[in-house]
Image: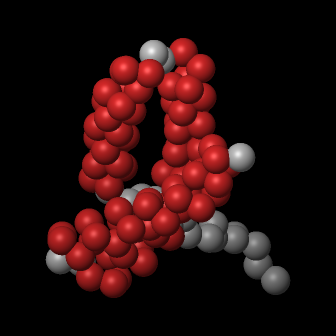
Amino acid sequence: VKLLLDSAIFSPITISGYFTVRSILEGTGLAGTKEKLTTKFKPTLLGAWKFWPIANAFNFWFVPLQFRVLYMNVLALLWSGYLTYVNSQKTPPMPSQPKSNKTE
């Protein structure tokens, strides 16, 4: 239940916050935030839903108690790197509608 709540509530909030803060710090403001949230939020959230449940399950089932914090900190560092990578990717232009060669 905790893993489900973490994925359903915490992940969308933190990912939205990440892209919002990064846009503000980059100087793109609300327009940059909107652009990042519309183009990068969904793939990043899906990535989080793939990464964190497996990481947490592995942590609870296999990692000895004394190493759990270290394990999660290393994974958080890797996740931060992934977020930075996603944020740095140029947003592809929106696909335009194909032109129709039909004459009516």
Measured as percent of width and height from the top left, residue 16 is found at 44, 67
Of residues 29 and 52, the one nearer the viewer is 52
Colouring of the image: secondary structure
Residue at the (82%, 83%) spot, across then down? 104
Q: Residue at x 59, y 37 (%)?
A: 53
Please, is residue 98 above or below residue 104 in the view? Answer: above
Q: Residue at x 54, y 33 (%)?
A: 56
Place of residue 6 in the rendered image (x, y in percent of width and height, measured from the top left): 58, 52
User: What is the residue that sits farthest to the right in this orientation?
Assistant: 104
Count of numbered tags: 0
Q: Is residue 93 visible?
A: no
Name the one closer to the observer, 67 or 22: 67
Quarter of the rendering containing residue 18: bottom left
Task: Where is residue 64? Give x, y as percent.
Answer: 45, 16
Confirm whether residue 7 shows in the render.
Answer: yes
Residue 10 appears left or right of 3: left
Nearer the observer, 10 or 101? 10
Q: Residue 73, percent across and down?
A: 32, 34
| Residue at 49 percent of width and 51 percent of height | 44
Q: Is 50 on the left or on the right of 21, as rendered?
A: right
**Where on the picture, by quarter, is residue 61?**
top right
